[in-house]
Image (cartoon, rainbow, N blue to C red):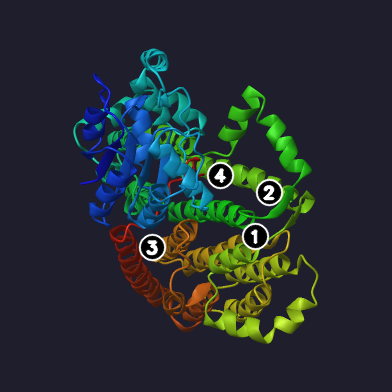
Amino acid sequence: MPTAILTGQPVPGSSIESELRSLGFDVQYASGAPDTETLLARVPATERVAVVDARFVGHPHALRLGLTDPRFPLSAVPGAVTARPEGRQDLTRAMARENSAGGGTALAVDNLADRITAALDADGADVHRPELGSLVAAVPADPQARNEARQAVAAVDDEAVRLKSAVKARDGFVTTFAISPYSRYLARWCARRGLTPNQVTTASLLTALIAAGCAATGTRGGFVAAGVLLIASFVLDCTDGQLARYSLQYSTLGAWLDATFDRAKEYAYYAGLALGAARGGDDVWALALGAMVLQTCRHVVDFSFNEANHDAAANTSPTAALSDRLDSVGWTVWLRRMIVLPIGERWAMIAVLTAVATPRITFYVLLIGCAFAATYTTAGRVLRSLTRKATRTDRAAAALADLADSGPLAEAGARSLAGTARRLPGFAAPAVALLGGAAVVATAALTDFGGPWPLVAAAVYVLTSSLAVARPLKGALDWLVPPFFRAAEYLTVLALAAKADVNGALPAAFGLVAAVAYHHYDTVYRIRGDAGAPPAWLVRTAGGHEGRTLVITALAVLLTATQFKVALTVLAVAVALVVLAESIRFWVAAHKVGAPAVHDEGEPA
């Protein structure tokens, strides 16, 4: 149990002790700095500890934000400071300074908690200070100030602020106006019944899987039920994040589950629609796989661009300035958020079309909408990249290299081509990646199944992929390299499966691309969590994008269409087992050691 040490003279009628206990703290009293240091030393190093001034006046949610957020080793609000186990050493050192002769911090600060916070700042510790907005957190110096602080507390509805802050600051139109106005109350209902965000996330996944099963029936009633359940799944998907923010139940495992399940839900639903269409005699597996490829490539564009510019120095761009100006005009904000077809708009569209139209029409509209959104966002980012003056860091280059997912063949080729790559112009990396990928995809799509040309093109693709990553990816457009690689690999699998023209080949290809896409998403989530890329042995075992492309084209040359279908199925199962086992092991282990939780406060595309 976390411990809160109340310092100073208790104030008659104060509710601070009961508020701390309601937040889960064991409350102890200290008369001054020496007593506080003694009590601090007695708290086990594995537990959270807080130092709070007994005169504190404020909203309970201000204390909750300041003292219970699990994402930060050190956190403070006026009159209170806290440390998780990883921040205890800094807190202990600051406390010792305050208790030593001469102190060392600003003597004008008249409460111990704030003096400790000042000492932490002086030591260069990273102390999180939550945005309180209209919430009150203060240590009044006299009865009049205390009365004024109590009046300020009474003037603001703590629960209303807490509910409002449970909703993302930036969301899509559908989510903001059609879901969040009531899902926040569902989040509060879950919190009051002790439900966790992970439980709600799991319920959202199960609801989406049931929706996919309903779509797979191929009946109109099944399609209507699928659309309704998909919306219900999205409501729960919003609720889990709102519950995490409402109750500050952030966790490493929860962040991973939320991000991973979003992809699993959507792509499982695509498969359900394809199965339902097949029951009605319509084969739309190519469309389903195309939708998954397009959506995954859109995400890779987002991730690569963000990582390339995560810590870019001298980040200026006229295009970015124009975008900022447009964001200051109300109607353009919502229009721009809607045309990129974020998850709320996209799932609402899919749900409605499923209920009233056919799976083929649903996929046609989805592909057109996502293609337009991808063109809009990618074009804007290309313009920003070309017009900005920025120096990209080694960290950005390393992240792009990890996102590229180069296997042993590309790595060996990159070492031998390093000298050649240094002599090429700045735009060479994305240009070479695009040309090599286009060559293998076009050859697979335009030649007969079983012919040697896709294998020849795949061998060329290995060389172009090696050249693309032979130097650090620090060019203005080098963030396009990973998306080009993703598109090349996925579309090659799609083209070859379609050319095989045998029942079951496209569903097998769907499974293989889904397994590989999971590996690529997992790489993104690890990088965003500052955990680095998946281990080198996993990338080597999976072959890298160029190795898998070469193997798949070789199988298409050496095997019959039926055998190729079986090979795709075997590869899908093998890749899924390897990447899932390693991913689950990593994230569970990270959760157990208390790795920092990463939660996306923007709506993913």
Where in the figure is residue 491, as x and y percent of width and height?
A: 54, 63
Residues under numbered marks 1 and 2 in contact, where contact means CB atoms less than 8 Å apart:
yes
Of labels 1 and 4, earlier in sequence is 4
Of labels 2 and 4, earlier in sequence is 4
Q: Quadrant of residue 220?
A: top left
- Would you name the residue on which mark 4 appears? 370
Of labels 1 and 2, earlier in sequence is 2
Out of 346 and 2, give the one closest to the viewer: 2
Describe the element under mark 1 as helix, strand or loop: helix
Marks 1, 4: nearer the viewer: 1
Describe the element under mark 2 as helix, strand or loop: helix
Residues under numbered marks 2 and 4 in contact, where contact means CB atoms less than 8 Å apart:
no
Residue occupying image coordinates x 79% and y 74%: 424
| Label 1 packing within 10 angstroms: few (<14), some (14-19), many (20+) | many
In the picture, measured across the screen, residue 260 lies left or right of residue 190, that is right
How many numbered discs sit on the rendered protein? 4
Q: Name the residue type under label 3.
A: Gly
- Would you name the residue on which mark 2 appears? 381
Q: Name the residue type under label 1.
A: Trp
Residue furthest to the front in view is 101
Out of 517 and 138, give the one closest to the viewer: 138
Where in the figure is residue 209, as x and y percent of width and height?
A: 29, 47
In the rendered structure, find residue 552 and report the number of the disc placed on it. Answer: none
- Would you name the residue on which mark 1 appears? 479
Where in the figure is residue 30, as x and y percent of width and height?
A: 26, 39
